Every structure is written in C-alpha cells, then in structure tokens.
Amino acid sequence: TAHYDPPTPSYAEFAEGYFLTRDSMHWFIDQYLGATPSPAEAFPLAAADLHGLPPALVLTAECDPLRDEGQAYAHRLRASGVACAYRCVDGMVHGFIAQTDLHTQAQEAMRGACEWIRALHLDRWAVADR
C-alpha cells in the first residue's frame, strides 16, 4: 500500500477476516521499509512517472484489501501508455493464485496469466524474426 491505511473501499471493507489483514499489512510494510520508509521507492502508485515500463498483467482478488490499489495501478499504467491487462477474480482473497489445488478460480487465473505471458513472448519473438 502507498501508506498504512489507504483511503480505498477495499482496504476498509476487507481489513479483517479475509486472510490478509490490516495488522499483517502494517507488519509487512515495516519489515520491507524498515525505520526510514520511502514510499516513492517502494510503492508503484507513489511513482511520479510510469512511462516506459514493460507490459503488465495486474491480477486482483475481489476480497483483498489491495484490490482497489491494484486496479488504480492498472489504470495509471494504461494512462501512461503502458500495455496493461487487468482482471479482478470474484470471491477470492489475497494470494488465492497460489492455491490452484483448492480453487478452480485460481487454476483459471493461473492459466490465463500463463496464456498472457505466452502471447506476449510469442508476439515479441515474431517481431524479432522479421
């Protein structure tokens, strides 16, 4: 998150009881940033300029406190001219994609992500072969 408690509906709605909690987010941020936080260097949404970044696939979960930030990041990427695909998976929580053995939605999302990457690389190889 761009700060401890971003003013997004998903952060407020899913702060407790949906796997990734507000308290665990605070802990992760503290571990990642240490005593001298520098959000501009740590969080993509805090970056002043996103132009020139590589193509991105942004995948969020409906019941994730970070959902709205993921969506905002995808919008900023597109507004900056970066090729970006965005998908929000209904009914899932943060980290669901690692649970392909438990959720068909995770299997479908993983398959979709692999297809997106494959298409991206096939397109680049086709251009390189010309």
Image (tube, rainbow, N blue to C red):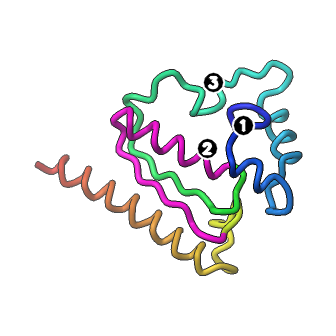
Residues drawn in magenta? 66-91
Q: Which residue is mark 3?
A: 41
Q: Earlier in the sequence, mark 3 or mark 1?
A: 1
Q: Position of residue 82 (x, y in %)?
A: 36, 39
Question: Which residue corresponds to the image point at 39% horizontal and 28% vertical from the top-left?
Answer: 51
Q: What amino acid is labelled 3 in the image? A: Glu
Q: Which residue is mark 2?
A: 69
21 relative to 78 in the view: left or right:
right
Mark 3 Cα shell of 10 Å, populated few (<14), some (14-19), many (≥20):
few
Q: What amino acid is labelled 2 in the image? A: Glu
Distance Cα–Cα, label 1 vs label 2: 9 Å
Q: How many marks?
A: 3
Question: Which residue corresponds to the image point at 52% horizontal and 69% vertical from the top-left?
Answer: 109
Q: Position of residue 76 (x, y in %)?
A: 46, 36
Q: Nearer the viewer, residue 21 or 31?
A: 21
Q: What amino acid is labelled 1 in the image? A: Pro
Distance Cα–Cα, label 3 vs label 1: 17 Å
Asked where in the image residue 63 lies, by quadrant, the reply is bottom right
Q: Which residue is mark 1?
A: 6
Q: Which mark is residue 37?
A: none
Q: Are marks 1 and 2 in contact (CB under 8 Å)?
A: yes
Distance Cα–Cα, label 3 vs label 2: 16 Å
Figure quadrant of the N terminus: top right
